[in-house]
Image (cartoon, rainbow, N blue to C red):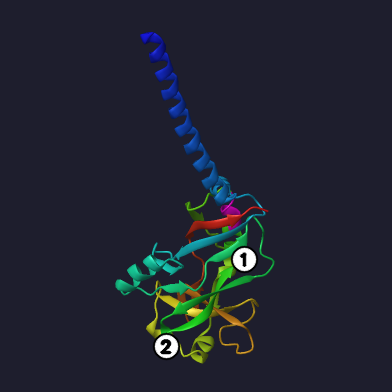
Amino acid sequence: MGEKKKKVAAQQTWKKVLFVIAAVLFVFVMVISSMGTNWITGLAPVKAGDTVVLDYTIYDASGVPFLTTSQQVYKEQAAKGAGVLFAKQQLTLTADQSLNQAIYPVTVYTPINGGSWQDFAIYNPEYNAISSGVVGMKTSETKKIVLPTNNTMTTLFSPEDLEKVNVNMSALDIGDTMLMGVSENPNASAANSTAVSYLRLGEISRKSDAGLVVDFGYPYAEITLYKFTNQ
């Protein structure tokens, strides 16, 4: 009789345990259902054609960030007294889709002349490198993207061009940086008032009687995948 009671008690205990497990599973399923499919997207990598939203920081040739969507990076650089541009919005693009224009403008805050919002130029090859590089990333992942540089990112500014925009050529030397205007038209100079120009930070690579050769290419950017939508 004692053995029978033990068996009954054991069966009741297992029923209680199974009931608790079933209840926990039910709650888990309810939580997953309330999340929809967002949790699946967070686990899956970005594919070509997905719409992605990125935080990004672009670095100069010295490895110093000069343009960012990160408030933390902006505050750190500003505290050091370094010139840094703050992008107004995250970068939204389609993964692995090339840009069909020469320049992709992004609105940035620059402290020059008391501070203002202006359009900064991301060049076509840079945009495409980011667009293709985001494929395979997962939500919250950070990745270093090497940005291509070529001859189109190097421009000669004549003494006449510099004079028209009130730049003192004699006060500048190789290695100095300049914040100047660039255009989608490769034949348009920064002094051409009829051309739509965008900001670009460049480094002086050569100086001669012919003017200043300014390199507007950047070595790399760091991107962080904020979110994406499957297509």
Tell me what residue is drawn at x 51 percent, y 52 percent. 139
Give the vertical position of 134 relative to 15 (above or below).
below
**Can you identify the residue that label 1 sits on?**
124
- Which amino acid type corresponds to the residue marked 2 in the rendered image? Asn
Residues in magenta, as a range: 131-135
Q: Residues within 10 Å of mark 2 (few under 14, many from 20)?
A: few
Whether residue 1 is visible, yes or no, is: yes
Nearer to the camera, 230 or 94 = 230
Is disc 2 placed on a helix, strand or loop?
helix
**Residue lying furthest front:** 1
In the rendered structure, does residue 125 fall within the stretch colored magenta? no
- Which amino acid type corresponds to the residue marked 1 in the rendered image? Asn
**Can you identify the residue that label 2 sits on?**
113
Nearer to the camera, 164 or 230 = 230
Is disc 1 placed on a helix, strand or loop?
helix
Q: Quadrant of residue 197?
A: bottom right
Q: Position of residue 170 (x, y in %)?
A: 40, 85
* Distance from the alpha carbon under mark 1 to that under mark 2: 28 Å
Q: Is 113 displayed left or right of 48 in the figure?
A: left
**In this rendering, which labeled residue sits more in front, label 1 or label 2?**
2
Q: Is the C-beta separation of discs 1 and 2 under 8 Å?
A: no
Of the numbered discs 1 and 2, the one sitting upstream in the chain is: 2
Q: Position of residue 84 (x, y in %)?
A: 40, 73
**What is the number of callouts on the image?**
2
Q: Quadrant of residue 94?
A: bottom right
Q: Position of residue 23 (x, y in %)?
A: 49, 37
Q: Is 190 displayed left or right of 5 in the figure?
A: right
Image quarter in which the N terminus is found: top left
Tell me what residue is drawn at x 33 percent, y 68 percent. 76
Tell me what residue is drawn at x 40 percent, y 80 percent. 172
Q: Position of residue 126 (x, y in %)?
A: 57, 63
Q: Quadrant of residue 191?
A: bottom right
